[in-house]
Each structure stands twice: as C-alpha cells, then as structure tokens.
Amino acid sequence: MDDQPTLQPTLDEHLAGQAAVGAVIASLARAAIELAELIAAGPLMGITGRAGGINAGGDRQTDIDIAADRLMCAALRDAPVAAVLSEESELPELLDQNAPLCVAIDPLDGSANLDNNISIGTIFSIRPRGRDVLSSFFEPGIAQCAAGCFIYGPQTTLVLALDGSVDIFILDRPAGAFVLIRRSVRIPSDTPEFAVNASNRRHWNGAVRSYIDECLLGASGGRGEDFNMRWIGSLVAETFRILVRGGVFLYPADARPGYHEGRLRLLYEAHPIALIMEWAGGTASTGRNRILDLSARTPHQRVPLIMGSQRAVREIDVLHEGFELRFESSDAPLFARRGLFR
Ligand code: F6P
Ligand code: MN
C-alpha cells in the first residue's frame, strides 16, 4: 500500500538490554558524534592539524588527537568503566574501580590522514574488569566482550562487534543518532585483493615477500589469478573495506629499527580489529599466532597484523612456517629460510 522505508533500529535501541557494555558504547557514540563534527569542520573550528608533541607511543600528536582523547576519555568517565588505556597516555588511568569494565582506546587512529581529507577513526576494545583492575589489560584478546571502530569518512559509521556478531551503523546527522544499516556482516571469502605498504618490501621477512610477490605475478603465478591492491594508510578504513569486500591486509614486522614487532598496537588496534574480523567470519594473525590468543606485556606493545579472509591469512601463516625468526642486526633480513628451504 505505501512504500515507506523499513525503520532500522537506532544504536540505542540495538543496545537495549546490554547493561554496562551498552552504556559504554552509547557514551562513546555520543563523543564520536561530537568528534565527527569537529573533524568535518576542521579549520572552521580551529583545528589546525599541527603537531603538538609526541604521544606515549612515540607518534606525532596533533591538536585533533588531543581533542579526540579529551572527548573519548570524558565519555568513559561517565560510563561504568574501571580503567581506561588510551594511545595518548603512557599508563592506564583508573576511573571507578568498582565498575565492571576496562576500555583500551585509540581516540583517533590515522590522524595524520586528516590533512589529506582521508577517513580516520576511533578504535575501542572493551573487556571485563578482573579482580586486579590493571592486570585486566594483560589478559589475552579473547577476554574482550565487545570492540568496534567509528570511522569519520564520507559517512560517519560505527562497526560494532558485540554478542558474537558484527553490525554496521551509519550516523543520521539531523537525528543525531547511529542507525543500523548492516546486520551480521560476513567477510567475503575469496576476494583477490591485498593491502600492504609495498614501499617496505625490502625490509619484509621472506614469508610476506613470497606471498606478495606471488600476488603480483597474478594469473601467471602460483595463485593463478590476478590480484588488486589497496593501501589507504588508515587502519579503520582498511578494516571497513575488508568487511564489505574481503581480501587481506598486512602490517607485518619488518627489519627497520622500531618495526621488529610491526607498527600497530596490540591493545587498542590489533585486539579490537581481530575481534571484528573473527566475529565477521574472517581471521587475524601475526603470521605465527592468532592475535586474540596474545596478551600484552606492556600497555603500548606493537604486534604484526595480518587480517581478512580466512583463506588468505591461513596461506600467509603457512608460508611463515617455512621461515625462522632472526634479529641479527637492524638492517639484516628479519627472517631467514629454514633448513629444508635453504
Ligand atoms: O597506526 C596509525 C596508522 O596510520 C594506521 O591507521 C595505518 O594502518 C598505518 O599507521 C599506516 O602506516 P604507514 O604509514 O607505515 O603505511
Ligand atoms: Mn592508531
């Protein structure tokens, strides 16, 4: 009779019945709406994008990083959170020690891309508080009960891993609310597409080099098909693409000084993104270990991250079995071929 669009639930409706986890996500979403406005207006709201200093992990910190950190941490102080670990602070901050959850957060990932008007985002990881609040952060990634990322791009979106499923929401700006647009996303399993910063090829280990070299050979190589390549340089945007299009993303360890454990951070980048991947039917690995099985030793620990469609990630894992790890000097190859392959 009428052709009214089907009403999709808002994030608040979706979170009904989720108690503490729902309250944390709703609070972060309110902060993300404010941050999206600030990012969209940029210089019109006094955002210069200029560096203000160096953060705890040694990355350049801009005025928008500082604003994002302030907004997200304020949102978490209003939520049932016992402690928060932010990329921008050296140590976790204790909030309400009796609250049931701990949150690790990258308030604004890829902020250097803002200058180029490329999508950036907020990544968060939520886990139950253990008896000792701070040691909760050092439990393996499977301890997470929810994770997600907000992406400030052409659309402001939320990718949410909750209750074993991954759902995508889009910000309805006039309504000031996130609305569900895709439920239970499944990563396509056979997309011949890879994402890697290929300028680092000479520093990679043999396994990563073999895989990418084969992809580049296309239909004439061992994989028997032509591959496409993408590199946005923005983890949240790459994650979104993998969710909707499939393929594989690699930020491997490499031989450059400071990259022996990769670039990305375990607690607020790799763990939450790995949960998203697994709950959407994909996987995430270091090449040797499942990311969700790893525990951090230090708050800002880095880790190699290989994620996406199961088949591609498994193939890269198998290639790693043929290479042994070696850290001889900063400019020597990181891996050498093992026995049989020599
Ligand atoms: O962690 C920051 C980040 O910008 C990620 O979003 C992205 O995947 C990566 O760094 C890009 O690194 P590079 O500039 O070395 O390619
Ligand atoms: Mn980051």
Image: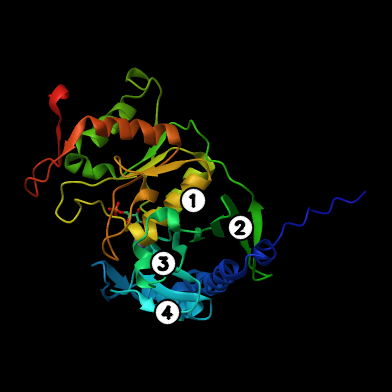
Q: Earlier in the sequence, mark 4 or mark 1?
A: 4
Which residue, given by chain and number where applicable, does mark 1 sit on? 276
Residue plotted at (33% across, 18% down): 220
Which residue, given by chain and number where applicable, does mark 2 sit on? 169
Q: Earlier in the sequence, mark 1 or mark 3?
A: 3
Cβ at disc 4 under 8 Å from ligand 2? no
Give the CA distance from mark 4 to mark 1. 25 Å
Q: Quadrant of ligand 2?
A: bottom left
Give the CA distance from mark 2 to mark 1. 14 Å
Residue sticking out furthest to the right:
1
Q: Earlier in the sequence, mark 2 or mark 1?
A: 2
Which residue, given by chain and number where applicable, does mark 4 sit on? 70
Q: Earlier in the sequence, mark 2 or mark 3?
A: 3
Q: Amino acid at mark 3?
A: Ile
- Could you tell me which secondary element the residue under label 1 belongs to? helix
Q: Residue 179's image quarter?
A: bottom right
